[in-house]
Amino acid sequence: MSTGGHSAHGRIVSPVLVGRDGELKRLVTAVTAPPSVVVVEGEAGIGKSRLVTELVARPEVAGRRMLSGGCNQIREPFPLGPIVEALRSSSEDLRGAALSPVAGSLRALLPELAHVLPQPPEPLDDRAAERHRLFRGLSEVLAALGPALLVVEDLHWADEQTVEFLAYLLAKPPAALSVVLTCRGEEASAAVRALTARPADTLTHEHIVLTPLDEKQTRELAGAILDSGEVSEEFAAHLCLRASGLPLAIQELLALLRSRGALIPWGGGWARRTLEELDVPSGVRSSVRERVGCLSPAARAVAEAAAVLQLASPVAVLIGVTGLSQQDAAGAVDEVLDSGLFVERDGMVRFRHVLAAQAVHEGIGLGRRQTLHAAAATAVQGLRPVPLGRVAYHLRQAGRLGDWVDAAVKAADSAFELGDDAEVARLLEDVLRHADLEPERRAALTIRLGWAASELLHLPDVGDLLAEALDKAPPGPVRGELRFLLGMQLEVTRTDPARRYRMFIDALEELAERPELTAWTMVALALPATMDVPSHERLGWLERALETLPEVGDPATRLLVLSKVAMVFTAVGDPRWAELTDRVVRETGGYAGRRREVNAYRSIGDEACLSGHHEVALQLLTGALESAAGADVTGGAEFRCRASMTMVAYCRGAWDGLGEEIEALRHGRSDRPVEVSLLDTVAACLSPTPGRLDAAQDLLREVVQRVGAMGDVDLLPFPVSMLLRVATARGEAAAAIAETSEAVAKWEANAFWPVGVRAVPALAEAMLAADRPAEAAALVDRYESRLPGVDAPLAPAALRQARGLMAAAEQRWSEGAAHFAASAAAFGGLSAPYEAAQANEQAAACLFALGDAAAEDTLKAATTVYGELGARWDLDRATQLARRWGLRPAPARSVAGDSLSARQRQVARLAAQGLTNQEIAREMFLSPKTVDKHLGAAMRKFGVRSRTELARHLDHLSGP
């Protein structure tokens, strides 16, 4: 393919693609198998854009609509810029398309398409819901364009909303759409890398990494640029070394050498003059500057102006920066275009490559550079709409910091109106870190930053800015709000709980006229804090929050307060939690359609699970998860709900594929400690396996310490219980009791008796193994004395199990068996099969000692559950118990259907009914990758290759 690329001195760009045949073939193959996504990764100047250009010219992609947009280093407070750029000229292609009213929401974003879009729907009062509707509209428009190729270049510079939309789009892409993303891998954020880290199973996926050219490829490229079949090997080796194999650097160095007259004919090709006489500058910088130095003064001025502007600009803007007359500027622009340094598109000119622009920019002296940036700030204000981000950037580079602050704040205002909290936070954080502001203005901007940051999945570390503004703020509501926001930052990051508590206490004194923040602060004070705060003092704040609630006019804040009070009431066993939960459900109409509603359901569901209300937790979290994706297109709400569902799955015995689900979520987009603690806890509890108990014990010990340090007190009974069981099995009970004593003291000090009772059996077993029966008895008595009147569903089952352990330790087998049987039945009624299996195993041991024939069936009930769960450590232990009493465990059946796990069977049946993996994932609240794993396992066990064959086998197993 020819790309032009000639200058007055000869060809600048190779007319053929060199060294990328394999990469181009992979790119074409993927793009022609939609829906697909391809990431083209490589450093600056490596040839990413050239590869995409070659793709567009291939006959295999003919007939596809080409949609292209690029991300810019200078951001504008306008979301989805590259997507808008790609779609804004598609009006003719959309004429007559059957678009739903949702597409009408794009009219403000894409005014160029307004005449072919439906009328806009009524505005929503929820920014997250508005964004979701916007994303739906964009996806619908892309689908309506039919077979299409969407190219987004320089994704490493993408704004957060663009990344969020691409994640939304790739989760369920239009069937005829292919997406190509280019980026510099070393500069890509974690969110960008996560876009294609775990693609949907329905998506064709390729990740192409471009590497530097070798000497042979460099020689071929140089020959193509010089329009000659050969260059000398010595020249090619030198060129490759100096250019580091970067195609851009190679073409720039050749252009420089040719302009110097440093190339001579050689054997029908080209060679360089003697190495001693001419030394090529390394890289691109020097060669570009030397080429610019050869231009006329007016052309150099235009080149410098373009380097300062950085982005493609109309000639009128260049005139404004240079001060040249229109006639002189036009001639100068043509001269730079002829040199091959500039490219032109749609009346806009820019440097051929961003590296060339940077090289020229760095070569301009400071004083002149600042003058040019000041002129650029004025010139770009003539554009419509005014690019506020560019104005702010140029003012800052000009050293006009006061004007920069004003422009950056205007840009933040625009971003806020567009619902782009990430851009608001980025702009305001930059201002607050680098500008000298009056205390009053600093406080106001810091408050705005604090609220914007609180909405983000990846919370920026702005605690120091909140503290700085707090130190300078006068007493009153502003200082109270700063204290509140700093306390929330410390709460989310799980750092310095004592300081967090002080912030909330001090905030209350200054928020008397702000009932919404007052009630919110009171709830925050009730959350687990330090050992120095008595539980009755903390819980008293909940009563005060409920008293303040009638004064709270904002429905979202009222819902938050209700859900958080219900959450803590659940943990402490206050029966009012159920009434408050019903109120939350009533106020939301039984549907968690917005982000705050999703969070409310999730908060209560989390604690309901930890306290033993497993079915209530499942119902609430299912409702939250069903709405999470629509309520929060950032993926944050869905991620948190999925993390919460892993604990529900663990408690309810849905272990099949749970480890894979946790691993998938660990690679998710959240780095907030609470989700990390939750996932680590479940993973640690699943870790004990035969032959690796030492590793499991080390992991559990680490998780107990970390979760305790984070203040996630309600999670502690899970790893503590498993750590005690593993340590007791390994003869290290006494040490484990000592290691976990602080954790036990924490949940007891917080009055989390309904949560903590879960660990009582393991604690009692360890104490008995350590020959401390009196302590075991005192432990059980302590919990029994604390639990009357407390809603603690786990208590009857856990305490009967502990009593059974004490009876068995004294060989009171009949009494022990009765306690264990009652415990197993109670756990079973709570949908806690793992705990029920343990109690059955312990009952069987007592029955064996009594010579009771029921022992075998009781033990079989336990081993069946262990087998279904995949709890190999427990199954091995129960099997050894059977063998000690002369029993031989029944061999596993070989029928394929019987060998399917419960989760595999469920996935297989849904697939046989015609559901796609994406639909199954939504139905079962799993990731598509996990569904794919289960479906593949089921097909392998049946020896089938299609869903139709799978359906026949399942029908055969079901029988008539």
Image (cartoon, rainbow, N blue to C red):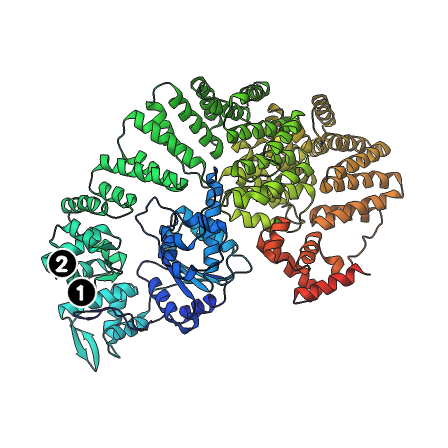
> Taking 727 as reference, is 211 left or right?
left
What residue is shown at x 65% (from left), y 44% (from top)?
A: 649
Mark 1: which amino acid? Ser
> Taking 49 as reference, is 378 left or right?
left
Tell me, for residue 26, which label it has, or none.
none
> In the depicted view, which residue is nearer to us: 578 or 155?
578
Q: Are marks 1 and 2 in contact (CB under 8 Å)?
A: yes
User: Residue 921: horizontal and vertical position, in percent?
Assistant: 61, 52
Placement of the C terminus among the 4 image quadrants:
bottom right
> In the depicted view, which residue is nearer to us: 532 or 364?
364
Mark 2: which amino acid? Ala
What residue is shown at x 41% (from left), y 73% (from top)?
A: 59
Label 2 secondary element: helix
User: Residue 467: horizontal and vertical position, in percent?
Assistant: 37, 27
> In the depicted view, which residue is nearer to us: 652 or 563?
563
Tell me, for residue 299, which label it has, or none.
2
Which residue does the numbered mark 1 point to in the structure image? 339
Label 1 secondary element: helix
User: Residue 282: horizontal and vertical position, in percent?
Assistant: 22, 61
Q: Residue 571 occupies which quadrant of the picture?
A: top right
Above or below: residue 504 compared with residue 671: above
User: Residue 327: horizontal and vertical position, in percent?
Assistant: 11, 58
> Taking 749 as reference, is 384 left or right?
left
> In the depicted view, which residue is nearer to us: 291 or 7?
7
Using a 10 Å C-alpha cutoff, classify the residue at mark 2 as few (fewer than 14 neighbours), some (14 to 19) or many (20 or more): many
